Image (cartoon, rainbow, N blue to C red):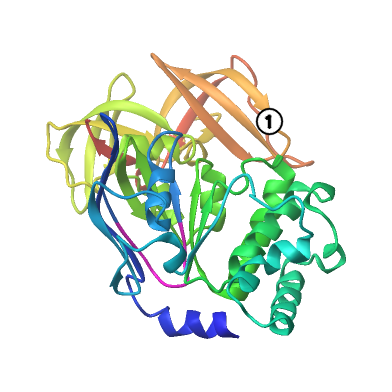
Amino acid sequence: VFVLSLFYSYREMPDFFELKNIVKSFGENRVVKGANFGVRCGEVFSLLGPSGCGKTTILRIAGGFEDPDSGTVHLDGKDITDMPPNKRKINTVFQNYALFPHMTVYDNIAFGPRTAGIDEKRVGEMVEEMLKMIRLEAHAASKPETISGGQKQRVAIARALINQPKLLLLDEPLAALDLKLRQYMLLELDRIHDEVGTTFIYVTHDQGEAMSLSDRIAVMNNGVIEQIGTPAEIYENPRTKFVASFLGDTNFFNAKVESLLDGEYCKVDMFGLGEFPSYNEHKLNAGAKVTVSIRPEKFRIFDKKPDADLNSFEAEVIDIVYQGAQTRYWVKAKDHRINIVTQHNRCYLDYKQPTWGDKVWVAWHRDDVTTLPEE
């Protein structure tokens, strides 16, 4: 009840947690280059990027385990930059769980309240509530070595949440788990978050995890936050070539803006493939060199030239990969090798599937194009 009331009292604040102009170097290596973002109360905010991009360093600065070279950290309207970790009301769940091996599941979860001097009867009530939330009541007397990786992760989360933090930091919490267990734990994390309402900052290099769990994502590259937005915003409207390539698969084409069309569209020359109308979200001028990004699932394959309202070109099927739920095609047109995902496979199909060497027409809608300024 306390945590839920905490959530509802803060959720209207637009910037419950903020990092302002954070810079951090280790020796001559600058790993964070002026990071700025705000996290809203009650949301799941993910830091997504490749290894070494600076996301874990940002998490450690947020938790007070590293000091920034410059910039400030704010929680609930207060500057906590110089505040020690144990005073911040911020808890962290680490990738390696960091459970006490000599303690039972019950005692691991009870460690924080006991250290804080809370009455043992109240500690028992709090632990029972946590065990129920993580669905491990039957394992209260178990040692960490006797339970699974997913169960250890839930214990680590409960041990952090029982302290009633205002903010929970999760550093690659599912990296050590196999694929199916990661998928299950994503659902569990989402359920736990919905129950307690605590603000989460989630660090991961896995775009699937970030897309599945997050309210918003900050995509990092080489110490810089390149874009912040909802999963749909970042996937459908990436601002940079790196964001387009890191979040899902895409096809890149070198191109040039030939002319501006009515409304928010332009005509681009995709070298060797033709000139096509495309959405011009970056307001690029005629003559600008651009990179055109088209996701594989935006393409459609036809055995003859499609309707005029679709962009299209002729190509040859050069590779086919059956993936169970779907089939992935690669086609070649001029010097371009293009990745296409078709519709989901079904037992009954009322049309002939393309095969190797077939001549096909590849088509897409002009709204399904991201036209990026040349970097």
| Along the line of sight, the residue nearer the viewer: 332 or 101 | 101
Q: Quadrant of residue 20?
A: bottom left
Q: Provide the residue span drawn in magenta.
A: 37-45
Q: Is residue 302 above or below residue 190?
A: above
Q: Quadrant of residue 357?
A: top right
Location of mark 1 (residue): 352
Q: Which quadrant is home to the C terminus?
A: top left
Residue at point 52% right, 40% down?
297
Residue at point 78% right, 51% down?
144
Amino acid residing under circle 1 = Lys
- Picture coordinates of residue 130, whole percent (x, y): 70, 72
Residue at point 70% right, 59% down?
155
Residue at point 69% right, 32% down?
323
Callout 1 environment at 10 Å: few (<14), some (14 to 19), or many (20+)?
A: few
| Along the line of sight, the residue nearer the viewer: 220 or 308 | 220
Q: Is residue 203 left or right of residue 13?
A: right
Q: Quadrant of residue 105?
A: bottom right
Residue 312 in view of the camera: yes
- Picture coordinates of residue 23, whole percent (x, y): 25, 45
Residue 175 in the magenta stretch? The answer is no
Q: How many marks?
A: 1
Callout 1: SS: loop
Q: Which quadrant is home to the N terminus?
A: bottom right
Q: Is residue 135 above or below residue 281?
A: below
- Picture coordinates of residue 168, whole percent (x, y): 51, 63
Q: Is residue 120 above or below residue 112?
A: below
